[in-house]
Image (cartoon, rainbow, N blue to C red):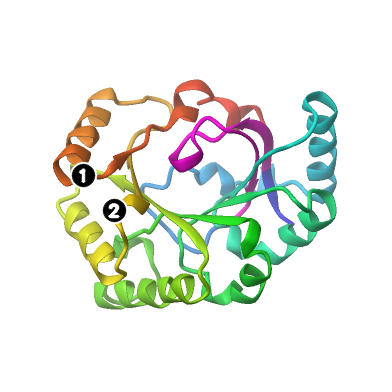
Amino acid sequence: MNINQVIYTIQGEGQNIGKPSLLVRLQGCNLKCPWCDTVFARDKKKKKNEEYLTNEIDKIIEQYGNIGNIMITGGEPFLQFDKIMKYFEKKLSTCPIEIETNGTLLNENIESLVKHKHKITLNISPKLDIQCHHLDSVFHLFQFYRENMNTVYYYRLNYNIKYVYDHKDENCVDNLMKFLLDNNISRNKVYIMTKTDNRNMDFENCLRTVEFCKKYNFRYTPRMHLLLFNDEKEKS
């Protein structure tokens, strides 16, 4: 496994905000978003192995006791999904797991997903900008997402949608609405986050996002970890 970071923290976004969680950040991503806020997860100099993962989890359990929630993020976790799940099957077999994903590799991992679906929640953050993808058109981008979301529905996987609102992107709202309509997604499943610099929380943008949520009846989610722990990744 290629691991960037292991910390015991709180979930900072979405449905389980505030919940104490073991965060495991894996290395690498299959997309190339120009505005990516976790480019540090691609830094090969910070790549760690399974021994680091085991040692850090042992320390956390010794200090805090039982772990009640696991967050697996990246990069894109589904590049290493089988490896990390085999590890947690041995180490923390009954612990619920949240997977932060861009939602593009679900079909490629469906066998393992179905096997573990009783304890997995997918936090799908769709990247609806063609610049992020190795695809030749917006049509193919939305078609690609429909194929992956059809898999989510067919196998009845637990999921939420987390979408980054950017008031400067003229296509942001239209892309979101098209994605929700294409995939018949209830607004109760959707959490809206503010696009913001990890090191400089822009509260004006947060308020714009709140207004967007009020206008379209979406749930707003803060990014609590950026307020509290915006230097954690530099310490790892």
In the rendered image, the quadrant that contains the N terminus is: bottom right
Q: Which residues are magenta?
A: 5-28
Q: What numbered label is drawn on residue 217? A: 1
Measuring 47% from the left and 77% from the top, which residue is drawn there? Answer: 154
Measuring 78% from the left and 34% from the top, which residue is drawn there? Answer: 66
In the rendered image, the quadrant that contains the C terminus is: top right
The answer to whether any part of residue 194 appears in the image is no
Marker count (numbered): 2
Figure quadrant of residue 227: top left
Q: Tell me the distance, in whole angstroms, between the alpha carbons under discs 1 and 2.
A: 8 Å
Is 3 left or right of 180, judged from the image as shown?
right
Q: Which residue is mark 2?
A: 187
- Helix, strand or loop status at disc 2: helix
Horizontal and vertical percent position of residue 169? 19, 49
The answer to whether any part of residue 183 appears in the image is yes
Q: Nearer the viewer, residue 217 or 102?
A: 217
Q: Are marks 1 and 2 in contact (CB under 8 Å)?
A: yes
Q: Is residue 14 magenta?
A: yes
Measuring 81% from the left and 42% from the top, which residue is drawn there? Answer: 52
